[in-house]
Image (cartoon, grey):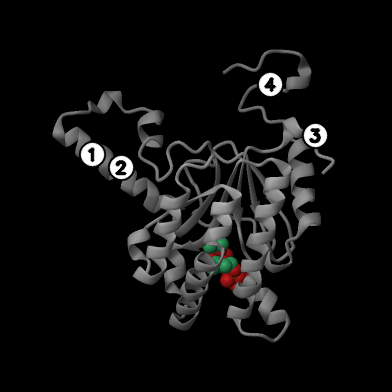
Amino acid sequence: MEVSEHRVPRHIAIIMDGNGRWAKQRGEPRLAGHEAGSETVRCVLNYCRDAGVRYLTLYAFSTENWSRPQDEIDGLMALLGTFVKKYGADLVERQVRLRVIGRREDLPAEVRRPLEDVEKETAGFGRQLIIALSYSGRSELVRAMRHIAEEVRAGTLLPEAIDEATISAQLYAPDVPDPDLIIRTSGELRISNFLLWQCAYSEFFVTPVLWPDFREEAFTEALTAYAKRDRRYGGVKSSDGQEAPL
Ligand code: IPE
Ligand code: IPE
Ligand code: MG
């Protein structure tokens, strides 16, 4: 990979979109697109390892996706269960920590159980694959606010002591750094309720490539674009030779 190492994002988050359109183009059922998309997940894990990306978050199922037709939901859940059973051992072997963020209590037990088994088995590893399941940024924030309100009610937290760190600490994966780069496939220019708190200063990369077709060339294009970005965080251009204020 020609991208210089210090410009590689530490955390990439991906809105894996376009499975349905991919299937439609082929005259196949939507589930065929989801199946093809699960193969892309395996490939992207390899690209991230090779590029030195430490955290990869994948948006696999949103809280809003429960409104899809029941047969698509069932198919997606079955696919997820199969994927975890099939590749859980791979994650252990590659020393990748699996984490689930989202309303895991919504997931069927036959999906949740194997996921949690792999989470436990891989808990000690440093590189991380974070899967957002029955996830939405707003529901994550509601959950965080409830936890904070409980602390206030219990008298262990003063309202005036609440700051950004208080809220960050109540997110699903508080120790994971915010995503440096958010990629969305299939061309839609929206966030669709993904990582609303964490994306404050993320760089965005949208590609027209559909998720099942997202391979090394498209991944490298995203990394190359990221490496050229000037992340100013509200300060001044680093090339202006001035210190960016904190
Ligand atoms: C993304 O692909 C996968 C999920 C949201 C589960 P879509 O199923 O949204 O595919 P399109 O957007 O209909 O093409
Ligand atoms: C976002 O894709 C959710 C996931 C990729 C899991 P959607 O296809 O559900 O989002 P919209 O409907 O285009 O906003
Ligand atoms: Mg979609």
Sooner in the amino-acid sequence: mark 1 or mark 4 = 1
Sooner in the amino-acid sequence: mark 2 or mark 4 = 2
Q: Which residue is mark 1?
A: 149
Location of residue 52 (image quadrant): top right
User: Is residue 161 found left or right of 196 in the rendered image?
Assistant: left
Q: Are marks 2 and 1 in contact (CB under 8 Å)?
A: yes
Q: Quadrant of the N terminus?
A: top right
Residue 4 in view here:
yes
Residue sitting at the far right: 2
Helix, strand or loop for disc 3? loop
Tell me which amino acid carries mark 3: Ser
Helix, strand or loop for disc 2? helix
Q: Which residue is mark 3?
A: 4
Q: Residue at x 70, y 66 (%)?
A: 210
Tell me which amino acid carries mark 4: Val
Q: Residue 138: image x %, image y %?
A: 41, 51
Q: Residue at x 69, y 68 (%)?
A: 212
Q: Measured along the vertical axis of the image, is residue 136 above or below residue 172?
A: below
Q: Quadrant of the C terminus?
A: top right
Helix, strand or loop for disc 1? helix
Q: For the residue carrying disc 3, how many other residues have a C-alpha within 10 Å: few (<14), some (14-19), or many (20+)?
A: few
Q: Mark 3 and mark 2: span between their CA atoms?
A: 40 Å
The verdict on label 2 being within 8 Å of ligand 2 is: no
Q: For the residue carrying disc 4, how many other residues have a C-alpha within 10 Å: few (<14), some (14-19), or many (20+)?
A: some
Helix, strand or loop for disc 4? loop
Q: Which residue is mark 4?
A: 236
Q: Which residue is mark 2?
A: 145
Location of residue 67 (image quadrant): bottom left
Tell me which amino acid carries mark 2: Met
Residue 135 in view here:
no
Q: Mark 2 and mark 4: span between their CA atoms?
A: 33 Å
